[in-house]
Amino acid sequence: MDLLAASLASIYVEIFRSDPILERHGDSSFARDILIYINENYTSPISLKKLSEVFHISQDHISHEFAKVYGISPINYVIDRRLSETKWMLINTSDTLASISRKVGYDNTWHFSSLFQKRLKYPPLKFRELYRYSQDEEEGS
């Protein structure tokens, strides 16, 4: 699973490396470093305060520059990154919701489930049911 997570992180970096937003705003090396840090540590607690401590840059500057380069706030990127991994695990594993929640960095399964539903319009287990079923059907065809 760690190899898969590393592969996904690498894909994210490659996607952003060729993103037209970078070409318009110029590449901010510290914004790229923050992106890499998030992709490597998204399963751990990440906040603007934590990023500020790690990179020795003010929270406001981190937030502004990251959003300018990538078009999303660092915290929303963390959430999106975690939810992307969650969707993959829901469809491709039989892991429990509590287990998946912990693996992507949320200790509170209720909060995690609520966030998932708010962002994706389905509760996690309904998402699994909908998308795993259609994937199983395709494989059976």
Image (spheres, rainbow, N blue to C red):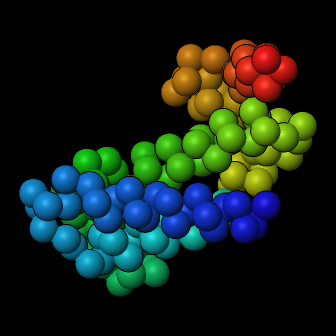
**Residue drawn at 40 percent across, 63 percent down:** 14
Residue 118: percent from the left, percent from the top?
A: 55, 23
Residue 84: percent from the left, percent from the top?
A: 58, 42
**Residue drawn at 45 percent across, 71 percent down:** 36
Can residue 64 be seen at all in this image of the molecule? no
**Residue drawn at 76 percent across, 54 percent down:** 103
Location of residue 108 with respect to 43 vertically, above or below: above
Quadrant position of residue 42: bottom right
Horizontal side of residue 134 vs 6, given as left or right: right
Total count of labels: 0
The outermost residue toward the front is 141
Front-most of residues 137 and 67: 137
Quadrant position of residue 58: bottom left
Can residue 51 be seen at all in this image of the molecule? yes
**Residue drawn at 46 percent across, 81 percent down:** 54
Residue 3: percent from the left, percent from the top?
A: 72, 68
Say which quadrant the N terminus sits in: bottom right
Front-most of residues 133 and 29: 133
Location of residue 52 with respect to 99 vertically, above or below: below
Say which quadrant the C terminus sits in: top right
Front-most of residues 42 and 50: 42
Residue 137: percent from the left, percent from the top?
A: 79, 17
Horizontal side of residue 77 vs 134, given as left or right: left
Location of residue 130 with respect to 81 vertically, above or below: above
